Amino acid sequence: MKLNLHRLWVFEQVVECGGFSAAARKLYMSQPSVSQHVHKLEVSLRTTLIDRSGPHLRLTAQGEVLLQYAQQISSLAQEVAAALDQVSDAPSGRLVVGCTSTYANYLLPPLLARFAERFPGVECHLRVGNTTEIMAQLADGEVRLAVLPGDRTGSSQHHRMEPILGEQVVLVASPGHPLAGRTVTPADLVREHLLFREEGSATRRAQDDALARWKLSPARCSEIRGNETLKHAVIAGLGIAVIPQRCVDRELQDGRLALLRPVPGLPTCTITLATSRETSLSPAEQEFASLLRTKGDA
């Protein structure tokens, strides 16, 4: 029995993409070619890996076992590439950074541009999701380095959480709001329409922390996905919101948004560098981590 590693990789992509057609599009192959690779893999292993009787992809018991080994082989291949990079003069390969949408919009693009200029041999990618989604990708090994809001649990058995930057959150309203520019107490806010991010986002955690600090249960609230949408909802006058300051600096400067000054005030949050304990960082990942730490020192 001989295991063809390329066919094994194609099989892994089919499972990851959820079907032959999606895998073919990702791999720039025809669907019959992808199907043939998986069929030949099954023939060489003398077993059936995928149950084709239903409308959705479903692995057989043998397929489940093989997938676990395929993922281990892929991870080992990445470690081999990382080890080879360590003896090279400059990092190469791929850099995949996980992050939330806020950091994808306001923090990481200029850093990635600086990194790409310094290391042109590295292909840079961003994986964007809310904090819960990126932590899941970090746990699954889809990313090995992520920039995330501070996690209350800190380092764990599987992750390292290293503080690198401070993040100020602010309470904002439209310029025409009656409380705009004023110092406000929880009593002033109790009947205001508060706009919240979705569960799982870091901004939502900051918003929940603010309500706890103010001992406030709002009479009216709405949930909005994404800080960009949240910001524009406040500009439109739909309500007030706690939001990271870096998201609204421009709007505060040009007068499209106004600050409210709550008492008690809002604390500074922490931006962390999250890495996996399961594998060592590649030279490219180490260099990018160093760049992030340098920004924190600055």
Image: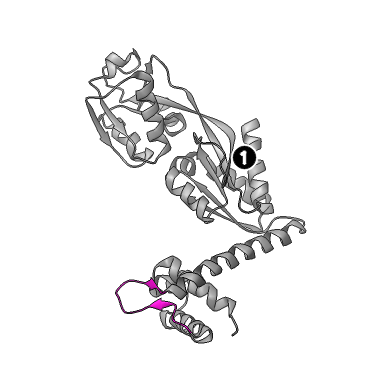
Observer-nearest residue: 154 or 12?
154
Q: Is residue 36 above or below residue 202?
A: below
Number of other residues with Cα within 10 Å of mark 1, as a class: few under 14, some 14 to 19, many 20 or more: some
Please tell me whether residue 274 is drawn above or below residue 252 in the rendered image.
Answer: below
Q: Position of residue 169 (x, y in %)?
A: 44, 27
In the image, residue 85 sits, relative to residue 10, either above or below, namely above
Tell me residue 118's x, y (percent).
68, 49
Q: Residue at left 40%, top 70%? A: 22
Horizontal relation, residue 204 to residue 109: left or right: left
Q: Nearer the viewer, residue 48 or 253?
A: 48
- Residue receiving disc 1: 292
The quarter of the picture where residue 293 lies is: top right
Given residues 141 and 263, the one toward you in this image is 141
Q: Secondary structure at mark 1?
A: helix
Q: Relative to residue 177, is residue 237 depicted above or below?
A: below
Q: Locate residue 149 relative to residue 194 in the image: left or right.
A: right
Residue 59 appears in the rendering: yes
- Image quadrant of residue 164? top right
Query: What is the quadrant of the N terminus in the image?
Result: bottom right
Residues drawn in magenta: 47-60
